[in-house]
Amino acid sequence: MKSWIKGKLSLIYLFWALIILIFGLLLIEQTKYVQPTSYYAEQIQAAQLMKSSLEAIKEERLKRAVPLDVGLDPNQTGIIGEEYTQLTTTLGNLEAKRTSSNPAFAALLVKYFKEANLKKGDAVAIGASGSFPGLILATLSAAKALGLEPLLIYSVGSSEYGANIPEFTFVPMLDSLNKGNIFPYHLLAISMGGYLDQARGMFYPDSREIIEKIAKESDALFINTENIEENIKQRMRLYKKAAADRPIKAFVNIGGATPNYGDT
C-alpha cells in the first residue's frame, strides 16, 4: 500500500508567505478609494429629496388617520399599501415594494438619466401606475436634481402593496409634496388603470366606481376611453403639447399600465 509522501516545504516559508499575504491585504485596504461620479452631487441631492418626500408622505398619511402597518412597512415609509383593496389590480411582491422605497433609487435614476445624455430643461415623459410609488418619487427626485421637466400621467390602479389605499393614493401623496414645496410637479393626466386601463376584472364589484371617482376628483385631465389605441394616442398628444416644441428625450414606465407597454 502506497503511503503519502511528506512535503519538504519548510514551515518558515509558509510563515513568511502568510506574512506577505496579510501585508498585501492590509495594503489594499489602506490604499483603496471610491471614485465618485462626475454627477455625484446630483445623486446625493436626489436621494435627499426622495428621503424628504417619504418623510412628508408619512406625515400626511398619519394626519389623514390612515394607519401604518409595521408588519408590511417595517421602515415606516408611508408608501406601502395593503394586499387587497378596491384598487388592487394584480398580484404584487411585497419585498419589491419595500426595496423600491430606498432613496438610493433616486441616485440610480440620476445615473440612468446621465447615461441617456439628458440635459437641464429636457422633457421626460413618465407613465406610471400606482404599483410602485417609491419609483415615481425616485424619478421625480432625479428629475428635480438634474433640472429636467417630468411629464407624469398616472393610473390609479395598483398591484398588491402599492398605492392601493383608496383614501391615500399617489394623488394626495403628490399634493402633499407640492404643498410642502418639495416638488413643483403636477399630474399631466390620470386614468383608471387595470385591464385595458378601464379598471375591469378587479377583485371587488365596486372597484371601477371608486377608481373613477378618484380620477375625476384629482383635478387632472381624465383619460377615459375603451379603445387602447386611442388611449395611447391621447397620451402622446398630451406629452407633445406639454413639451411644447421640445422633443421628448426619454420615457420612463413605472408599473404595468397597459397604455405604457401595450397588451401583447
Image: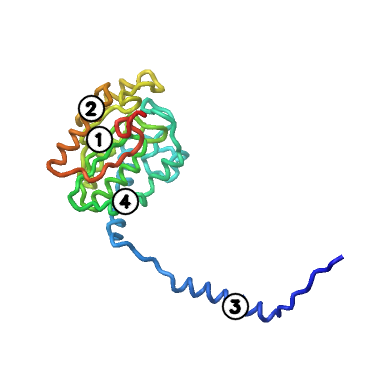
Mark 3 residue type: Ile
Badge 2 or badge 4: first in the primary sequence: 4
Q: Which residue is mark 3?
A: 19
Pick whichever, 59 or 45, lies toward us: 45
Residue located beneath label 2 in the image: 223
* Amino acid type assigned to the residue bearing label 4 in the image: Tyr
Label 3: which secondary element: helix
For marks 2 and 3 on the same chain, the one whose residue lies earlier in the sequence = 3
On screen, residue 240 above or below 227 = below
Residue farthest toward the left in the current orientation of the protein: 245
- Coloring basis for residues: rainbow
Q: Residues within 10 Å of mark 1 (few under 14, many from 20)?
A: many
Q: How many marks?
A: 4
Which of the two discs, 2 and 4, sits closer to the camera? 4
**Which quadrant does the N terminus fall into?**
bottom right
Q: Secondary structure at mark 2?
A: loop
User: Gap between marks 2 and 3, in whole Å?
Assistant: 70 Å
Q: Which residue is mark 1?
A: 153
Q: Are marks 1 and 2 in contact (CB under 8 Å)?
A: yes
Q: Quadrant of residue 234?
A: top left
Q: Earlier along the polypeptide chain: callout 4 or callout 1?
A: 4
Residue 190: x %, y % from top left: 24, 31
Quadrant of the snapshot with the C terminus: top left
